[in-house]
Image (cartoon, rainbow, N blue to C red):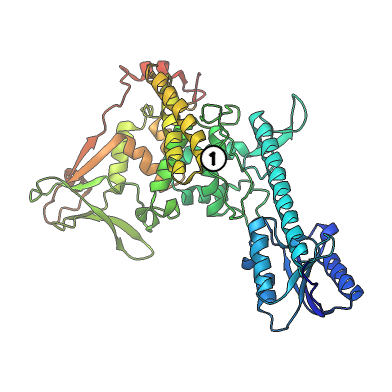
Amino acid sequence: MSPKKTIRTCVLYSRISLATEESVSIRRQVEAGEAYASARGWKVVGTFVDEGVSATHNKPETRKGWSALLAAPERYDAVIVWKVDRLARRVIDFLNANEAVKARSAGIVAVEDPIDMTTAQGEAFAIMLAVFGQMEAAAIRDRVTAARNYLLRNGRHAGGVLPYGYRAVPNPNGAGLVIAHDPERILYVREMVRRTLDGNTIYSTLQWLQETGAPTPKSSKSGWIYSTVDRLMRHPLLAGMIPHNPGNTSSHERGDDVVRDRDGLPVVDESLAVLPVGQWRAMQARLATTPDGGRKQPHAMRRQTSGVLSGLMWCADPSHEEPQRMYRGTLGSKDRPRAAYYCKHCHQAISGVEDLILDAFLNRMGDQLRMTAVEEVVEGGTVQLREASVRLAELGTEIVNASTDRAAEIVAEMTRLKEIQDEARDQPAEVRYAPVADVRTFREDWESAESDEQRRAIVGEALDRVLIRRGGRGAKSEAARMARLTFEWMPAGQLEPDDDAAAAAWAGYSPGTRRAIV
């Protein structure tokens, strides 16, 4: 039996994860340590604290309080903790902490656990307690995870912050809560999605929310900000897919995975979706490729003058083998700027034609229905094929660093997904076109547009480009300027009805209501 070391001096160490844990508060831990030392005649030469620090996610050596304890200039014979779990919840962390204390010729003593690591027997017993503590923590974690999985797979709300436009309501079919649309805010979410699908930037949508006075998120104290809109447009709940971990992790990021069925495919709740999964994934791809994540408006839209024709003006000077794009500049004073377009290659320029071109656009297309505004509905096995491919790619990345047991699970899941792909390929895909809920003319949409981005999208559906030729010297009249322009209009699109009456019949359009009959 090893002789018991004589202890004369000691330091106290206290740790807590949440300040609301009154049963293990810092004050109580320190008082218990002081009483323990006083009863044994030990002198306390220092007190070190880590408050708001998790022992599960933070090793002792990464904590400020524990690091200060090990670096303290005072000599001490023992480190008093309230319980072993105040120091570490994993065996390896406990052993490393013990070695660091032993390097200072000291030992760990616990008030509530009957251990004294200043002896060999006490050290062995402490290690056994740490092993059981880790097993208990793992069991608790598994129970919490299992409970969460059960709730999610049964359509219940498992806690965590819900995105804007959604709320938790009493479960109409039993106990607990379920996720549902927030009737007032979901209307704004639908419009935000529509704007994003139409090509508007996140920044533009942010401005729209501010201008319309949309209700701000309940958790926001500073109103609408860019990151809030961007995060919402990327949330899988918009497609009816429920995140497996809707709350925040220690890194303040939501987990990427969503609730899946036994085959590994996402479980989709159609009642929560505001757009199909395929459209949502296309929107994510578009957001991922937008410069600066869509934070800034397009360069043309940030100018003082209108950017409605940006990208549509092309130089047709004979010196070019093919027409060259013309770029927008500004002429005139700061108070009265006007748009001018110039060619970087031959330096041809033209100004004062924007109103002429837009008048020509409205005269030709104003009373035509916007037949390009259709929603594509994909049926058959296409959706399953696409989702299986996405999941296979995710699993392929995960298997590289997976443990042996997890790798076996991944292989089994990948095998099921390959079978699903084979079955999906045998299901013929059907694509049909349906009119949008609100069918309007080009002029109606033009008059209701609120930004240059929206107007540019409307013009671009009908006008492919305008070719600019050089004019005669001094030819500045309206007729002279129009003579320099050649309009190239877009084809009719996928649907080519004989006339407006046939188009209206196809769309179920009623001029009196401006609504489609669906």
Amino acid type of the residue that numbered disc 1 sits on in the rendered structure: Asp
Picture quarter with the N terminus: bottom right
Residue sitting at the far front: 1
Residue at mark 1:
257
Quadrant of the rendered structure where residue 457 is?
A: top left
Q: Please, is residue 76 above or below residue 327 in the view?
A: below
Compared to 278, does 203 lie above or below?
A: below
SS at mark 1 in the image: loop
The answer to whether residue 179 is visible is no
Q: Which residue lies furthest to the right in this view?
A: 39
Q: In this view, does 82 lie to the left or right of 102?
A: right
Which residue is pictured at 51% across the width and 43% down the height?
Answer: 403
Write the residue at 73% across / 50% down: 132
| Residue 414 position in % (x across, y down) | 45, 31
Q: Can residue 465 be seen in this view?
A: yes
In this view of the protein, which residue sits in the foreground, 457 or 500?
A: 457
Figure label count: 1
Q: Which of 250 and 434 is in front in this view?
A: 250
Residue 95 placement: quadrant: bottom right
Q: In this view, does 174 lie to the left or right of 366?
A: right
The percent coordinates of residue 210 (x first, y second) are 56, 51
The spot of residue 122 in percent (x, y) is 78, 63
Residue at the image position 68 percent from the left and 66 percent from the top: 98
- Spot occupied by residue 365 in the image (x, y as percentages of width and height): 32, 32
Question: Within 10 Å of the Cα at label 1, are there few (<14), some (14-19), or many (20+) other Cα atoms?
Answer: some
